Image: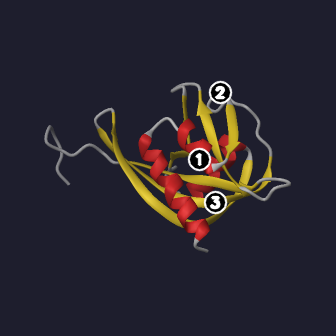
Amino acid sequence: MPTGPHALPKLIRAAGCVLWRRAPGTGALEVCLVHRPRYDDWSHPKGKLKRGESAEAAAVREVGEETGFAAELGAELPTLRYPVDGRPKQVRYWAAEAVSGAFVPSSEVDQVVWLAPAEARTRISHPRDRDLLDALTQRLEHH
């Protein structure tokens, strides 16, 4: 591995979920988005891997920390790659069903919303996150 001025910046590894549930009463598909006041954006729950932690474990942990919900991982969704402050970031995502829990606001995430996929598409702040939503709905419609 090269060092010095020509070394590649260290990859930031993260994981998250497109968290979903069936709406109480109607059974319609709903997706959870989190609002992060630090960035004033709406996105899927995600975060950096801790040392020695698997991406799957990090995804479930981050959902719990950010939304208060326990999640059951399903299919892996597309991995997103984008630069953050000059460093490459890789975020692995899974479809995950919310199985229990309740949201408690924090300094990291102050709101969550459960929306129909079409509404979630318009609320999502970053276009790359819409691709994950599409991947989730395609998976759930065909299984």
Q: Secondary structure at mark 1?
A: helix
Disc 2 residue type?
Ser
Discs 2, 3 touching: Cβ within 8 Å: no
- Structural crowding at the residue carrying mark 2, measured as other residues with C-alpha within 10 Å and reported as few (<14), some (14–19) or many (≥20): few
Give the residue at mark 3: 96
Residue at screen point 49% across, 54% down = 132
Distance of mark 3 from mark 1, alpha carbons? 18 Å
Q: Quadrant of residue 60?
A: bottom right
Which of disc 1 and disc 2 is earlier in sequence? 2
Quadrant in the picture for the N terminus: bottom left
- Structural crowding at the residue carrying mark 3, measured as other residues with C-alpha within 10 Å and reported as few (<14), some (14–19) or many (≥20): many
Quadrant in the picture for the C terminus: bottom right
Q: Nearer the viewer, residue 58 or 122?
A: 122
Foreground tag (2 vs 1): 1
Quick check: 26 left or right of 79? right
Disc 1 residue type?
Ala
Foreground tag (3 vs 1): 1
Which of disc 3 and disc 2 is earlier in sequence? 3
Quick check: 25 left or right of 82? right
Residue at screen point 67% across, 44% down = 115
Discs 3, 1 touching: Cβ within 8 Å: no
Circle number at residue 130: none
Q: Secondary structure at mark 3?
A: strand
Give the residue at mark 1: 118
Distance of mark 2 from mark 1, alpha carbons? 28 Å
Disc 3 residue type?
Ala
Quick check: 129 left or right of 89? right
Give the residue at mark 2: 107
Q: Residue furthest bottom?
A: 143
Which of disc 1 and disc 3 is earlier in sequence? 3
